[in-house]
Amino acid sequence: MLIETKEKREAPPRVRSANLTEVVAIQNASVKAKLQVEGLSAWFGTNKVLFGIRMQIPENRVTAIIGPSGCGKSTFIRTLNRMHEMVVGARVEGQVRLDGQDIYAQDIDPVLLRRRVGMVFQKPNPFPTMSIRDNVLAGLRLTRALDRGRGEEIVETALRQAALWEELSDRLDEPGGSLSGGQQQRLVIARALAVEPDVILMDEPCSALDPIATARIEDRIHALKEKYTIVIVTHNMQQAARVADRTAFFLLGELIEYENTNDLFTAPKDKRTEDYITGKFG
Amino acid sequence: MKPAAAIKPRARATPIRERVVEYALLGSGLFSILTTAVILAVLVYETAGFFSEVSLADFFGDTQWTPLFSDKHFGIWPLVLGTLLTTAIAMAVALPLGLLAAIYLSEFAPEKVRRVIKPALEVLAGVPTIIYGYFALVFLTPLLQKLIPGLAGFNALSPGIVMGIMIIPMISSLSEDALHAVPMSLKEGAWALGASRLAAVFRVTIPTALSGIAASVILAVSRAVGETMIVAIAAGQQPRLTADPRVPIETMTTYIVQISLGDTPTGTIEYQTIFVVGASLFAMTFGMNMLSQRLARRFRGKYEP
Ligand SMILES: Nc1ncnc2c1ncn2[C@@H]1O[C@H](COP(=O)(O)OP(=O)(O)OP(=O)(O)O)[C@@H](O)[C@H]1O
Ligand SMILES: [Mg+2]
């Protein structure tokens, strides 16, 4: 599926770039790169917060982003669905390719892009005026993409994927805000899944949750990578170790090290990574 | 021991000073409550006097209001209808313009534009109502007369429109506050699902702010109902049971002005009518303000855990 473009007809036929075939080696297996980040820098006004990031994010894998507070983790994943530019004065340079297509190209509509790259935020944010059912369908309604009659089926599928169906199947008409924090976060995941994106970005999805709710979400992340490419920001290194295939360590807006998770935690190549994972700073 | 000694002198001085301030505050609080109570008592007393002579059935059943004529009728409806007519016209102007301004300012305007327009709109609210009244009478009415056949020199339309213009900043400012208070996380949630800015505004931001917006609208209605000067100057003084905006009417407030300025002797039934009209007006605005506050509280309760 290509990103639909604003000027679909005028757009020149794209030459499949050589990079598209670029692969990422994960534990000796080679996987296609879903997202390719090239020379990516980001600013808030005149304040530069990301410096020339280069990174390949593998398809159907979980990639974790770790690093101390303020190092640009959130900013980085927000450049991957062009949410960064929604902040007044925020700016991006460089390239992010999704399946080989530059998402910052002139003819890309960021609104359409975000249907392919979904996002789950740190604080659960179900829409308080909508029922649980309407929350799940919100993405399709907001984009006028809901087929009549398919609603119930979509709701059930999305809630099952988020492991909420058993708990909530008879409470679909209650407001989304009536759930516990952990349920709300899974509802928000279901809401993101209902639009059937390719990639799901998660910004510290468990930081407001207790260990049991966290375990549930992690379990979902494991299950979801079969269908989706997942990028998760986390403060919790155990969590990165538990869920991620690959882990990237950011420091002061730079990508310091990006390895298979096992390697990064057991044999960090960079001294700064080692200091961080052994708790010497951050 | 030293630190205790250091703080002692001040500690001793404060109780008295604080007590004085406390009593002063309490006193001024009580004073305003007392004033309101006295006003209410007078209203109730005179209203009771009125209803000892006029039956409730006449008051709510008669269709004429002619307390000053020899053939006296005390049907409140012409005054109520006059009030509702000017209010409806005002809201027809203020509601769409005020809400659009609020949505634009809160969701679309660049910060620079917002910083200019918001105070500029609020200046509108600072214009003395007498000026609005004259504006309606000597400018808008003659202008409208060229467009609308049969528009009388005094009518409900022109002051209604001007009142609407006066109320725009009230709606836009309060609704803008409500829209602005919708957490960024909800808007981002909508954008992240692939919603355009417009879709996010109409499907998420506005529904979330709805009780706050409704509160501002009700407050505006209550302001229009209670508005006096504009209608007293430009709407006429003829209590008439009509929904025709082109002819002279009289609102409840105008009637009170008319009698208060006249030479009606105290204690007469004519004199008492202004209290019964005042009490009705008070009941209407009070009810609406209560409703508005409840809605506003509901709105706040939802987003400020
Ligand atoms: N809206 C904003 N406006 C201006 N500067 C911002 C904004 N958001 C973040 N920043 C700055 O950008 C830098 C990176 O912030 P970012 O939120 O990406 O860090 P983070 O790694 O996600 O931190 P945390 O772990 O605390 O969430 C920080 O220096 C921060 O101060
Ligand atoms: Mg962050």
Image (cartoon, coloured by chain):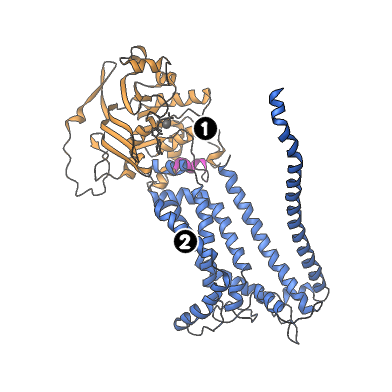
Chain colours: A orange, B blue
Residue A167 image position (x, y, % from top left) = 54, 31
| Image: B4 above or below B157 | above
User: Which residue matches tag 1?
Assistant: A183
The kind of secondary structure element at disc 2 is helix
Whether pointer 1 and pointer 2 mark residues with C-beta atoms closer than 8 Å, the reply is: no
Q: Which residues are magenta?
A: A124-137
Name the subunit of mark 1. A
- Residue at mark 1 shares a chain with residue at mark 2: no
User: Which residue matches tag 2?
Assistant: B120
Left or right of B194: which side holds B118? right
Left or right of A52: which side holds B166? right
The kind of secondary structure element at disc 1 is helix
- The answer as to whether callout 1 falls within 8 Å of ligand 2 is no
Left or right of A269: which side holds B156? right
Closest to the observer: B149 or A84? A84
Number of residues whose C-alpha sits closer than 10 Å to that of mark 1, classed few (under 14), some (14–19) or many (20 or more): many
